[in-house]
Amino acid sequence: MRGGKVLPVLAIIGAPSSAGAHGPGQEKAPESFRAAGLLQLLEERGFPVVDRGDLSLVRFRPDPMHRRAQSLERVVRVARAVASEVNASLRAGQMPLVIGGDCTITLGVIAGFLEHGVDPGLLYMDGGMDVGTPATYRPGMFDSMGVAHMVAEPGAAEALTRVGPRAPLLPGRQIVPYGYTPGEPVAPEQAILDRNGIVGFPVDRVLGRAAAAASEALREVTERVERLVVHFDVDVIDFVDFPASDVPHINTGLTLAEVMTSLGVFAASPHFAGLVITEFNPDHDDEEGTLARIFTRALADALAFGHQQSRPDAIAQ
């Protein structure tokens, strides 16, 4: 208990998978965060923590037989395993904190909530929109296609759209992308947003006003849902500011402080029900794990913001 508030029991779930990624490395993130002391940092801030361990490790490998839908079967298998573990944590009265892993694990997280009977909203804090499909995204890696498969966009791989109890997993009106850099050209992405009723908060709407923008995004999604899941792709942070993401976004992202300020606002909401961390690549860190230590401390502070007396714009500064 902190400040008279009962803190949620956080269920730490490792999803060490780079099955849907553009290359290996992300599968090491759960181990890296544990070594950096994430669980202890959360406990020091008053959170009861249950370590549910890691799912099976799945490392990236090219799939030359399915060039536009790389490793689909493995991606689906990982997502379903994540869904089962998230559902189990919710049944136990715990709040899932899922450490990935590539972005496709978020489909499994949403599937797990739906299997538990909770129809959540999704704040998709990511450097990209992830609205490609095997029909439109030439490299064929599914971690750039998460939102498209969440809403079952035409051309999406049916097996991935059906990892949960319904398809689409979420209607677009329950998804709010946050901090993303619009594609070039902008028009094709915007057409997908408009068709699905998705209201996005691009990076320029967040820069320099993170606390206010996060509050606006929170209002946007909680007008439609009672429970909120936050997807946090580390590539929403400018790679020059914090070079840990798997796919660098250079001179286009938010600062680490702006991202953690935003997360603090989201986590302080009574609607907040779960968090997914994706795309942290320990291969970009030094031998001492400096970036992982910085990140886990800032993450713990952001999650604790709603139960502390600090200002949101003080997080990670």
Image: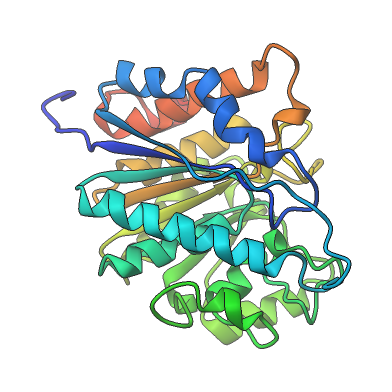
Query: Viewed as shown, does residue 48 lie left or right of 146?
Result: left
For residue 194, above or below residue 206:
below
Residue 6 x/y as whole percent: 14, 33
Residue at 38%, 52% (x, y): give it. 85
Tally of marks? 0
Residue at 72%, 56% (x, y): give it. 181
Residue 16 x/y as whole percent: 59, 42
Q: Is residue 134 visible?
A: yes
Name the image quarter holding the N terminus.
top left
Residue 178 sits in which quadrant?
A: bottom right
Residue 297 x/y as whole percent: 49, 21
For residue 235, above or below residue 84:
above
Query: Viewed as shown, does residue 30 lie left or right of 129?
Result: left
Residue at 81%, 72% (x, y): give it. 137
Report the front residue among 142 and 308: 142
Residue 134 x/y as whole percent: 76, 77
In this picture the colour scheme is rainbow
For residue 79, above or below residue 132:
above
Residue at 60%, 40% (x, y): give it. 208
Report the front residue among 111 and 80: 80
Residue extending farthest to the left is: 4
Residue 154 sits in which quadrant?
A: bottom right
Report the front residue among 121 and 216: 121
For residue 79, above or below residue 172:
above
